[in-house]
Image (cartoon, helix red, strand yellow):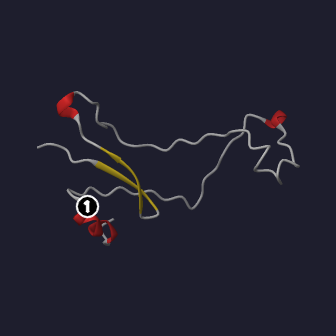
Amino acid sequence: MEEADSRFYVDNVPIRVFKNNKNIGVNYPSQPMHIEASLWDGDSWATDGGQTKINWTHAPFNAHYQGFGIAGCPVQNSLDIQQCYSSKY
């Protein structure tokens, strides 16, 4: 049985469709998903409009996530998406 396309949602908004093109030699996800995060220099825009500078001497920085939830729900087609809101998931 061929795997369906993968659709990724954030807050119920589809953000990406990963087409299953294994039949033409395109790799398709075969491992569980995981979360990655990164830091970048936001001095010019994220710190009081650039007025407060980041003190990089405190690096490396550690991040802690709380209240973060992620769930997966397999569906065969987009019409089945409502099942992901059931008590099963």
Left or right of 73 in this view: 48 = right
Q: Position of residue 41 (x, y in %)?
A: 73, 39
Q: In the image, is residue 53 above or below residue 77? A: above
Residue farthest to the right, as pictured: 51
Q: In the image, is residue 71 above or below residue 59? A: below
Task: Tell me what residue is drawn at x 79 percent, y 44 percent.
Answer: 44
Task: Tell me what residue is drawn at x 73 percent, y 34 percent.
Answer: 60
Left or right of 21 in this view: 59 = right
Nearer to me, 60 or 51: 51
Element under disc 1:
helix
Left or right of 59 in this view: 32 = left
Q: Amino acid at mark 1?
A: Ser
Q: Quadrant of the C terminus?
A: bottom left
Q: Position of residue 16 (x, y in %)?
A: 39, 49
Task: Tell me what residue is drawn at x 42 percent, y 64 percent.
Answer: 12
Residue farthest to the left, as pictured: 1
Q: Quadrant of the N terminus?
A: top left
Task: Tell me what residue is drawn at x 19 percent, y 44 percent.
Answer: 3
State the residue position of label 1.
Answer: 78
Q: Position of residue 76 (x, y in %)?
A: 20, 56
Q: Residues within 10 Å of mark 1 (few under 14, many from 20)?
A: few
